[in-house]
Image: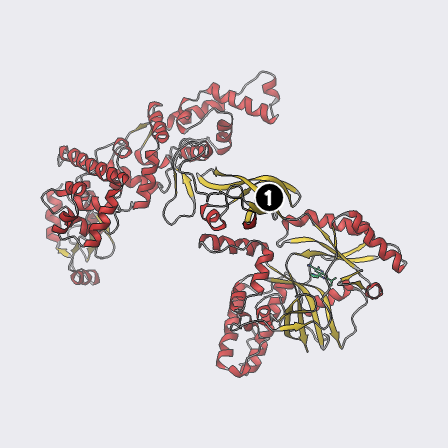
Amino acid sequence: MTAHTPPASPAARVAELRELIDDANYRYHVLDDPAIADIEYDRLMRELEALETAHPELADPASPTARVGAAPSREFAEVRHAIRMLSLANAFSDEEVAEFVRRIEEQLDIREPSFAVEPKFDGLAISLRYEDGRFVQGATRGDGETGEDVTANLRTVKTVPLRLRGDDWPHVLEVRGEIYMPRAAFEAWNEKARAAGGKVLANPRNGAAGSLRQLDPRITAARPLAFYAYAVGVVEGVDLPPLHSQVMQRLRDWGFPVAELAGTARGAQGCLDYYRRIGAERDALPFDIDGVVYKLDDLAGQRELGSVGRTPRWAIAHKFPAQEQQTRVEAIIVNIGRTGAATPAAVLVPVHVGGVTVTNATLHNADQVARLDVRIGDTVIVRRAGDVIPEVVRVVPELRPDGTQPWGMPTHCPICGSEIVREEGEVVARCSGELVCPAQRVQSIFHFASRRAMDIEGLGERLIDDLVALGFVKSPADLYALTVADFVEMRRQADERDGTTPESVKAGKVATKWADNLVEAIDRSRVTTLDRFLHALGIEHVGESTAKALATWFGSLECIRHLPWPLLTVVPDIGGEVARAIGHFLEQEGNQRVIDALLAGGVRIEDTHAPSTKLRARLAPAIVLAALGIPKLTEKRAAQLVAGPDGAAAATSIDAEGLATLGMPEAVASAFLEWRAQPAHRGLLKRTLVATQALLDELATLDGGDNSCLPLDGRTVVLTGTLSSLSRDEAKERLERLGAKVAGSVSKKTSFVVAGEEAGSKLAKAHELGIEIWDEARLQALLDGNR
Ligand code: D41
C-alpha cells in the first residue's frame, strides 16, 4: 500500500501520504477497523514530516502533521455562530419522557413518532466549520450565540477530520458535536500525574474542558481528547436527506465519528427501552455519558415544532443518576491491602452516586490527601464512574467547619499495630507486620508455602483462603501444628459454609488421603535451607538472590535476626533500602514471635554455618560508619573520622572541635552532629558499633581452616590466552574452588588477569587499567600449593 511505483514528485508523494494517513485515521477512529499497523502509520508520518520540512512550500494546515499543535496564542478570538447552538431540556423520569413524546404527538398529530436516539456524551459542545471540504474553524458553544475560537486546539484532536472524505460534501458545512476525554486516557493521565505528584483532573469532563481551553495547542495535543458528531449547523450547496439519522450517516461517510450506539426508536416506550439498554452498558463504555438524547428523526417535523427560548421542542436529554455527589467526610481510615499497602479512605455520610449508595471513597495515598487537603468534617465531591472505586475528587472549601486538622498517615497499622513505613521516593506506605498482620495473612502464607520458598506441595491459595477465613491458621507458623483432623474439619466447615457438602460426607464417609498428603508435605518442608527460609518470610525487597547473599555472608538465622540493619549493607548488592526493609521487618515483635514459633514448630535450617570470614574486610570501621546513611558522610570521610586514637568509638562521643582537629570539613561535621543529635540515630549508631565488634570477635575465633575463608575469596579473575598445562574450563573450576569469581572481561573490578600464550585484547586492557598480570607458572604455583 506504500506504492512502490517510480519516485513521484515531492508534491505528489506528499498528497499521497496525506491520503494514506487520513485514511488510516478514518479506519482507526471512525470505523474502529484499523487497516495498517501502528509502526507503518508512524513510518508514513515520519516520511511526510521529512518531506514537509524539506519542502516548506507544501505546508498545509489540513495536513495530518498539523495535529502536533501550533504556537500558543494570547487569547481566544470570539466566534459568532451563524446558526445558534441550542441547548437541551432535561428529563429525569419516565413520566417526563412520556410527556415530551405526548406533546410532539399532539402538536404534529401523529402516533408513536420515530426518534433518533443517541448517548449523551459528558464533554464539551463545539462547532466545526468546513469550507470546500477543509477544516477552517472550530469554536466552543459558549452561550450558544458566541463561542471561543479554538481552531488550533481542535486541529490536534485526532478524531476531528481536517479534510473531508469523498466529494459530495456541501461547500460550507458546520458540524456540531462533543469533545470528550476517554475514560482510559483520563485514568492514565491521573495515574501519571499522581505518580509525579502533579495536579490530577477532577473528572473526564473537566479534563476535556480544561484541555480545550489551553492557550498553548501543544498542551492540548498532549491530552488524549476525542470527538463525536451529533448535529449539523450551516449547510450550503447540498440538500441533506430528510431524516436526522440519515444525516448522521452522511457525516460518517464524510469522515466524522458518529456514536456507534446511536440508533432509532419508536414512541415513548422505544425511547425508554433504549435508555435502559444504554444504562446497563454505561459502566462498561470507554467514555463517560450522563444520559441519552432523543431527537425527532423527521427534520420537517423538527422545523414545524421549533424551539422555546434556547431549547428545541423536538429533542430532550434523558439523564442518568449523577456520578458525582456532595457529602461529608466523617472519618479518614487506612485500609491495609494484601501486600501491606496502606490506603487512606474517607468514611462518608452515605450518599447516592450513579445509582448506588456510597459510604466510602478512596483517597489513594497520603500525597493525594495532602494535595486535596481533605480533612475530617470536610464537605467533598465524590465520584463513582464505571466500575471504578468511588473516589474523593475535591473539597468544597467554603463548607469547611472551624477547627479541622490536616490529615496524616498513622504511624502504626490499625490492624496489627506494626509500624507503617514509607520509604523515600515511594508513593505507597506499607504495614511492616508482614507475618502477623491479618490483612496480609493469606498473601504471606501463600508466599511462604510457594515452591521457591518453603515448597509445601499442594497448599494452594484457595486452601489458604479457607484456612485463614475459618481461623485455622493465623501465621505461617500455625501450619506446622495442623493435623489431618484439622484439615478434615476445615473442609467440613468450608463445605457447610458454601452449601457444597458432598453426598459421601453426608453419608458419613470422609476421605482423608488429601489431608494426609498435606500434612506430609508440610512435614517435609520443615528441613530447609537458610536462603529458602529468609525468602519465605516475605520481607519486602528480599527475593531469592538477596536471601542467598544474606545466607552466604552471615551463615545463620541467629546472626541475621539480631543485626542492626546498617550491617546488612556490608554485603555487596544489599543497599540501604533493602537493608532498611529487613530492619523494619525484624523490628516488629510480632514477626520475631512468628520466627520463634516456626523454630519451635520444628523448622530446621540445615545449612547453618559461621559468618563468612570475608566479612572481616567489610567490617572496617569506615565501611560500617558509611553504611549508616549519615548525610555527607562518605566512606572517605568516615575513614577520616575513625583515624583518630579512639578509632570507631570516636563516632559516639566526638564533638565539633574534635571533628575539626581531624580535619573534617565544616559542612560534613555539622551534618554528622545534627544526625547524631537524634536519640534514635544515637541508638542505632551504638547498636551498630557493638554488633560490629561482636561479629569481629566471633570471626576471630574461627580458624583459617574454615571453608568460608578461601585464598581467592572476593577476588575476580580473568583468563586469557592459551594455557599449556590445563584447559580453560579446568583452570576456571580450580580457581572457583579457591573462592575466585572468574569473569569473561577485564574491568576495574578485576583482581588479576592470568595470561597464557597469545593473549590478546584482554591483556592489553589489563595493562591499560594497571591490573595485576599473572603468568601460567604463577597460577600453577598457587594451584599446587592449594591442592
Ligand atoms: O452527546 C451530547 N452531549 C449531545 C448534545 C447530543 N448527543 N446531542 C445534542 N443535540 C443537541 C441539539 C439537539 C440541540 C442539536 C447535544 C446538544 N444539542 C447540546 N450539548 C450541549 C448543548 C447542546
The location of residue 21, given as percent across then percent down, is 58, 70
Residue closest to the eye, 37 or 776 = 37
Quadrant observed for ligand 1 in the rendered image = bottom right
The location of residue 170, given as percent across then percent down, is 73, 75
Q: Is residue 727 above or below residue 607?
A: below
- The answer as to whether callout 1 falls within 8 Å of ligand 1 is no
Q: For residue 679, what is the image quadrant?
A: top left
Q: Can you say which quadrant of the picture contains the C terminus?
A: top left
Asked if residue 4 shows in the view, the reply is yes
Q: Which residue is mark 1?
A: 327
Q: Is residue 517 above or below residue 61?
A: above
- Horizontal placement of 715 versus 598: left or right? left
Residue closest to the eye, 775 or 441 = 441
Q: Secondary structure at mark 1?
A: strand
The amino acid at mark 1 is Thr
- Horizontal placement of 671 versus 400: left or right? left
The location of residue 593, given as percent across then percent down, is 35, 27
Residue for point 82% across, 57% down: 114
Within-10-Å neighbours for mark 1: few <14, some 14–19, many 20+: many
Q: Can you say which quadrant of the picture contains the N terminus?
A: bottom right
Residue for point 41% across, 40% down: 430
Q: For residue 359, what is the image quadrant?
A: top right
The location of residue 271, given as percent across then percent down, is 78, 52
Q: Is residue 733 above or below residue 470?
A: below
- Horizontal placement of 742 versus 306: left or right? left
Report the number of numbered marks.
1
Residue for point 58% across, 46% down: 382
Instruction: State the residue lying farthest toward the top.
Output: 508
Q: For residue 756, what is the image quadrant?
A: bottom left
Asked if residue 620 shows in the view, the reply is no
